[in-house]
Image: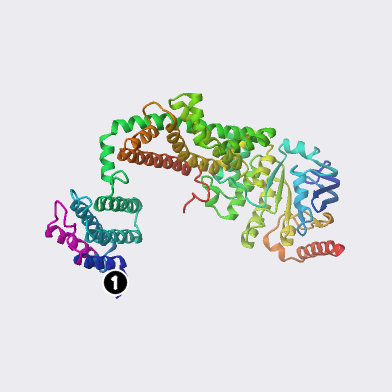
């Protein structure tokens, strides 16, 4: 649970520059960051600050152009091939021709799990995200919140220790979002996974995280890393406490500083 | 006034009846078998009765039944009255045909407005409406050609075509066997399979992707009229050369659609596969092919009609003495136009069934696509 000697994600002077028609775009520059095992790390910042790009570099969906990064002590590519992480996208990205069950079975099929084990894991993960009984439905028969929960179940199914979540609740309304945030914390406590969570909501970041990484754009960089002093056990009304508001204030200050630096 | 507005078809039908009354008798003075005033008044009563009923607030189903009987009864009697009197119909005849057609129209309108309660009623309605619609095309065709005495060579009445089909079943069956079950089916299956396979190959091998599309494009631009005789030279007179033409015609739509379909899967879905470290074939089978299915079925549907056209036209350029295209080209030369129409009718029915089967398979396979999900 507590930080172990070898971090799950470790970035040193990490940079990524896209070459576009309008010249180079510095999506990430000089990012130094460590994510310890069992951490819940949120990345927050305005759009273009590189928070999603950082997650994609960790996932080996993009390649860094400078600096170094290791995931579980390996290169991101090795980590991806070792199936070290589950990725939850901004949209559920469930395959509409597969039932919820079959969607969760997808990574298990690809990774060659036996049918009996697949069934057992599907049942367990559906239960984790409170979707038991919906396995036979097609994604388009469920609400947006249920679809996103199903996609989280899919990322959990193969038991990777690292969960990368890219604004998973961004498209949902606030009531559903609160509910899913609460569930996500329970899930994190139950599975003891390391979670990297991209968001643009300050309350969401403060509520969920043990560590908040504040980022700013042009070039995408880290402006502040805030260690949360909130307890791990967090009811929804913790958001009214002075401690919570203070952390939120610090995040807001960090975001503002990142902006004034630019203008 | 509001009664009249309830059914303008009924109002016009009544008007046409009055006009027809001034133009009686039904047939011209030289008609060999004049129609008695009894039959004429039955026709007039049927139409007027149906038209009047359409103004009344009767339940839709009952009204539709009354209109159905009135319109088709009148049409039946009218067509019966020109039996033996082809070409002698007077203006009263055509006015009454038009009036009964209006009642038929009203009947379809009433049926279309019914809210079916239950699955069975819905199915019946869904079949009944186009059936009545189709029947009226035949009725107007029959009444028009026989009433006006259109020369048989120009356009035979549907009854004669039906009779010809009934009398020539063995010939038609042999033609269908030759053209459809040999040339079309073989060519369709091989052409579509080849297009599909080459599309996947082109997806896998980069240099093929660059090279194959322009060549395939060229192939699709080949005029079938030019290709057919060459295929006959290469593969002989029998069905193989026609199958070859069908292969050439169906290959390209399948290739292009499959290539487009393989690109249809979204970036996020691909990233997902990448995050699982899925290999090329796993991604192909589990993501890209299912996502391509709507495109593939598009090609299958286009090809179902192309294949039929290709095989029939190809038979114009040399065949053994059997086959639908062969029959059409020889019978038109012998002025047996009814046989030509019989072949056309059979081809149309088979083409529709072919298309329907592919469309059903599509619905079963791509039930998940937003256009097929239904409620």
Instruction: Look at 70% across and 54% down and name the residue there.
Output: A167
Res A174 → quadrant = bottom right
The magenta region covers B22-50
> Does the rendering let one see residue A123?
no
Task: Please name whichever residue, A83 or B143, is drawn nearer the observer in this view of the structure.
Answer: B143
Q: Can you say whether A212 is above or below A109 in the image?
A: below
Res B354 → quadrant = top left
Neighbor class of circle 1 (other Cα within 10 Å; few <14, some 14-19, many 20+) is some
Dividing the image into 4 quarters, which one contains the C terminus of chain A? Answer: bottom right
Task: Please name whichever residue, B256 or A64, is drawn nearer the observer in this view of the structure.
Answer: B256
Q: Could you tell me which chain the residue with mark 1 belongs to?
A: B
Asked if residue A163 lies left or right of residue B338, the reply is right
Asked if residue B326 lies left or right of residue A51, the reply is left
Task: Please name whichever residue, B86 or B7, is drawn nearer the observer in this view of the structure.
Answer: B86
Instruction: Look at 47% across and 39% down and name the residue there.
Output: B306
The percent coordinates of residue B34 (x first, y second) are 14, 55
């Amino acid at each position: 649970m507590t930080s172990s000697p070898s971090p799950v994600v470790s970035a040193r002077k990490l940079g990524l520059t896209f070459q576009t028609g309008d010249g180079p775009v510095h999506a990430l520059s000089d990012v130094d960051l460590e994510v310890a095992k069992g951490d819940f790390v949120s990345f927050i910042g305005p759009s273009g600050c590189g928070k999603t790009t950082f997650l994609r570099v960790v996932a080996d969906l993009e390649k860094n152009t400078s600096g170094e990064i290791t995931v579980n002590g390996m290169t991101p590519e090795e980590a991806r091939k070792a199936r070290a992480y589950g990725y939850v996208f901004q949209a559920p990205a469930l395959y509409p021709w597969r039932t919820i069950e079959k969607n969760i079975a997808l990574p298990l099929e690809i990774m060659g799990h036996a049918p009996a084990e697949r069934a057992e894991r599907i049942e367990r993960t559906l239960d984790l995200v409170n979707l038991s009984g919906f396995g036979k439905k097609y994604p388009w028969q469920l609400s947006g919140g249920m679809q996103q929960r199903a996609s989280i179940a899919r990322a959990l199914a193969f038991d990777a220790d690292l969960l990368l979540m890219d604004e998973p609740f961004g498209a949902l309304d606030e009531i559903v979002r609160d509910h899913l945030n609460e569930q996500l914390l329970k899930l994190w406590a139950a599975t003891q996974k390391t979670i990297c969570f991209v968001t643009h909501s300050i309350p969401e970041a403060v509520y969920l995280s043990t560590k908040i990484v504040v980022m700013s754009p042009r070039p995408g960089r880290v402006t502040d890393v805030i260690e949360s002093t909130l307890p791990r056990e967090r009811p929804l009304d913790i958001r009214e406490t002075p401690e919570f508001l203070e952390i939120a204030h610090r995040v807001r200050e960090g975001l503002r500083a990142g902006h004034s630096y630019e203008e | 006034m509001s009664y009249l507005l309830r059914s303008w078809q009924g109002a016009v039908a009544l008007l046409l009846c009055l006009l027809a009354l001034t133009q009686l008798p039904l047939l011209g003075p030289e008609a060999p078998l004049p129609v008695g005033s009894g039959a004429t008044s039955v026709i007039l009563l049927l139409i007027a009765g149906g038209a009047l009923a359409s103004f009344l607030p009767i339940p839709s189903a009952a009204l539709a039944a009354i209109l159905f009987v009135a319109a088709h009864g009148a049409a039946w009697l009218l067509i019966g009255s020109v039996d033996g009197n082809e070409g002698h119909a007077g203006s009263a005849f055509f006015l009454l045909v038009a009036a009964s057609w209006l009642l038929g129209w009203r009947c379809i309108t009433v049926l279309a407005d019914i809210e079916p309660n239950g699955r069975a009623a819905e199915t019946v309605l869904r079949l009944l409406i186009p059936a009545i619609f189709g029947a009226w095309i035949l009725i107007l065709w029959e009444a028009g050609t026989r009433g006006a005495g259109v020369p048989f060579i120009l356009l035979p009445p549907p009854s004669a075509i039906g009779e010809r089909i009934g009398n020539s079943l063995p010939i038609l069956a042999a033609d269908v066997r030759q053209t459809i079950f040999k040339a079309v089916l073989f060519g369709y299956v091989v052409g579509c399979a080849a297009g599909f396979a080459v599309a996947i190959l082109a997806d896998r091998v980069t240099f093929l992707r660059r090279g194959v599309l322009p060549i395939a494009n060229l192939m699709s631009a080949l005029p079938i009229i030019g290709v057919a005789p060459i295929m006959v030279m290469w593969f002989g007179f029998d069905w193989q050369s026609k199958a070859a033409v069908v292969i050439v015609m169906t290959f390209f739509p399948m290739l292009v659609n499959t290539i487009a379909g393989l690109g249809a899967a979204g970036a996020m879905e691909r990233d997902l596969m990448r995050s699982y470290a899925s290999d090329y074939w796993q991604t192909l089978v589990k993501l890209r092919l299912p996502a391509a299915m709507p495109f593939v079925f598009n090609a299958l549907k286009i090809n179902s009609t192309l294949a039929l056209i290709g095989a029939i036209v190809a038979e114009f350029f040399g065949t053994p003495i059997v086959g639908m295209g062969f029959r059409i080209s020889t019978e038109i030369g012998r002025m047996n136009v009814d046989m030509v129409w019989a072949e056309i009718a059979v081809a149309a029915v088979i083409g529709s069934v072919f298309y329907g089967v592919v469309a059903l398979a599509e619905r079963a396979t791509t039930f998940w696509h937003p256009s097929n999900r239904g409620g």
